[in-house]
């Protein structure tokens, strides 16, 4: 039997184990997939799983912190600077594949500029995907930095000038379903497309507020499935 798993913290929201174990049963694959919830005080435990599992997914908050534990990164993960898949000591990033495949069918002619909420590993993959699709992006964080806006900087003009808004923060994820990124939702309109990397719950408060203003919305489930299938190909290459 082959053994796979996901490393992160917390993992109570994770759909990966269910997805892969159902896949293994459906396709008669002799394998199992487990959750390895490791808090940051015990991050050194990651090496044990990386060295002993047949394939590993990496999620928040370790997509960048795992890099020093790896032998090398592939070209995409190197450019992104974040890893969500590990195989034989090599780090890969398939988040960008899942994101691009999910967003592409929703794009309209005027969708040329995006706001990316968050600056972590998921945001890095999203920015890479947007660049590949020819869409310019602006990062938004809690604190204004060089070339990064803070939420207070999101004026009507800024919001109108960015028709795509991507949430790469964990805000709104179970069990914290009453939270959402503090953007000015009053400036959202039918011209906007809101994409949430969170997939559990299916409709976050971020998406709910966007839909109420007439915006198109998409949660992270297709992104999850896309990156998972890309990971499976890597583990079996």
Image: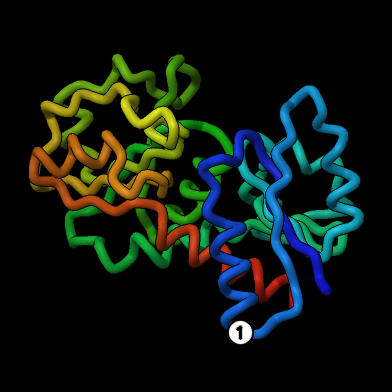
Q: Is residue 175 left or right of residue 29?
A: left
For the N terminus, give its image quadrant: bottom right
Q: Is mark 1 on a helix, strand or loop?
A: loop
| Rendered image quadrant of residue 187 | top left
Seen at 28% across and 68% down, the residue is 105
Does 120 sit above or below residue 97? above
Q: Where is residue 8 in the image (x, y as percent from the top left)?
A: 67, 40
- Neighbourhood count class around disc 1 (C-alpha, 10 Å): few under 14, some 14–19, many 20 upward: few
Residue at the disc numbered 1: 27
Q: Please name the residue shown 31% across and 26% down the image.
A: 178
Looking at the image, which is closer to me, 226 or 113? 226
Q: Where is residue 92 in the image (x, y as percent from the top left)?
A: 70, 58
> Which image quarter: residue 148?
top left
- Residue drawn at x 38%, y 39% is 167
Where residue 68 sits in the image (x, y, percent)? 84, 40
Q: In this view, does 92 lie above or below 31?
A: above
């Amino acid at each position: 039997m082959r053994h796979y798993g996901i490393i992160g913290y917390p993992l109570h929201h994770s759909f990966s184990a269910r997805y892969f174990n159902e896949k293994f049963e459906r396709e008669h694959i002799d394998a199992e997939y487990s959750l390895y919830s490791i808090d940051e005080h015990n991050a050194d435990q990651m090496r044990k799983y990386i060295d002993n599992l047949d394939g590993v997914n990496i999620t928040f908050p370790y997509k960048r912190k795992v890099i020093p534990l790896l032998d090398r990164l592939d070209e995409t993960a190197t450019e992104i600077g974040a890893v969500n898949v590990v195989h034989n000591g090599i780090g890969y990033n398939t988040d960008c594949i899942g994101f691009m495949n999910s967003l592409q069918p929703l794009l309209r002619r005027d969708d040329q500029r995006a706001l990316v909420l968050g600056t972590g590993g998921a945001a890095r993959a999203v920015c890479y995907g947007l660049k590949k699709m020819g869409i310019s992006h602006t990062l938004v964080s809690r604190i204004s930095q060089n070339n990064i806006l803070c939420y207070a900087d999101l004026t009507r003009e800024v919001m109108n000038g960015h028709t795509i808004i991507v949430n790469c923060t964990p805000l709104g994820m179970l069990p914290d379903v009453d939270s959402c990124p503090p953007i000015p939702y009053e400036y959202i309109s039918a011209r906007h497309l809101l994409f949430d990397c969170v997939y559990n719950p299916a409709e976050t408060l971020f998406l709910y507020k966007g839909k109420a203003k007439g915006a198109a919305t998409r949660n992270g489930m297709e992104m999850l499935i896309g990156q998972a299938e890309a990971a499976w190909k890597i583990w079996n290459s």
